[in-house]
Every structure is written in structure tokens, then in C-alpha cells.
Image (spheres, rainbow, N blue to C red):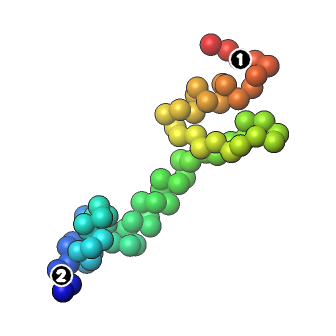
Amino acid sequence: MFNLDWKECIDCGDDVHNERWALGYKWCKFCGEDRARTERESWCVIQEYTKGNYMFVTNASAHTTLRQTNPKENRA
């Protein structure tokens, strides 16, 4: 009924369950958590104006997005 084969974590070689591997997670839970922490360090969330929505800003879009958040000094 269940396939109990295990795969190896790409980083540390620890066991990764086959179902987790099939979902695209090639890391064990510990290595995956470390990678997620590293990724979250580069996140930036801004609020365009006082009662505005929060926006997720990536490193690639930060330059353009942050320039557009100040309507008084909209530079090209």
C-alpha cells in the first residue's frame, strides 16, 4: 500500500520520505528549514502608504517598487 522507500537529502544525505520527495522537496526537514531561513532573510515587506496594503518586495523588484512608493518624488 505505501512505498516505504527513502531518498537521500541533497545537502546532508539524511533520509527523506518518498512522498516528500515526490512533492519536490529534495531536502530533509532540517536542511529545508535552514534553506527557508536563509531565503526569508532577503524578504522585505513594505506598506505603500499609511492605510495601504502590505507588499512583498524581492531583491529583483526592490529598486523599482521602492521608487514607486513615494508619490511626491516619482523619479524615472
The relative height of residue 48 versus residue 33 in the rendered view (above or below) is above
Q: Position of residue 19 (x, y in %)?
A: 27, 73
- Specify whether 52 is left or right of 67: right
**Vertical arrangement, residue 64 with respect to residue 32, above or below:** above
**Around disc 2, counting alpha carbons within 10 Å, would you say few (fewer than 14), some (14 to 19), or many (20 or more)?**
few
Provide the secondary structure element on which disc 2 rests. Answer: loop
Q: Nearer the viewer, residue 57 or 51?
A: 51
Vertical relation: 50 (above or below) 73: below
* Classed neighbour count for the residue bearing mark 1: other residues with Cα under 10 Å, few (<14), some (14–19), many (≥20): few
Q: How many marks?
A: 2
Q: CA distance from mark 1 to mark 2?
A: 58 Å
Q: Does residue 28 appear anywhere in the picture?
A: yes
- 69 vs 39, left or right, is right
Which is nearer the N-term, disc 1 or disc 2?
A: 2
The residue lying furthest to the front in this view is 1
Q: Which residue is mark 2?
A: 3
* Image quarter in which the N terminus is found: bottom left
The answer to which quarter of the image holds residue 46 is top right
Residue 71 in the figure: left or right of residue 57:
right
Rendered residue at 64%/46% (across/down)? 45
Query: Is residue 4 something one can see in this rendering?
Result: no
Q: Residue type at mark 2? A: Asn
Q: Residue furthest right?
A: 50
Point 50% across, 60% down: residue? 37
Where is mark 1, residue-wise? 74
**Front residue of this view, candidates 71 and 53:** 53
How far across and down, in percent of the image, does residue 43 sit? 56, 48
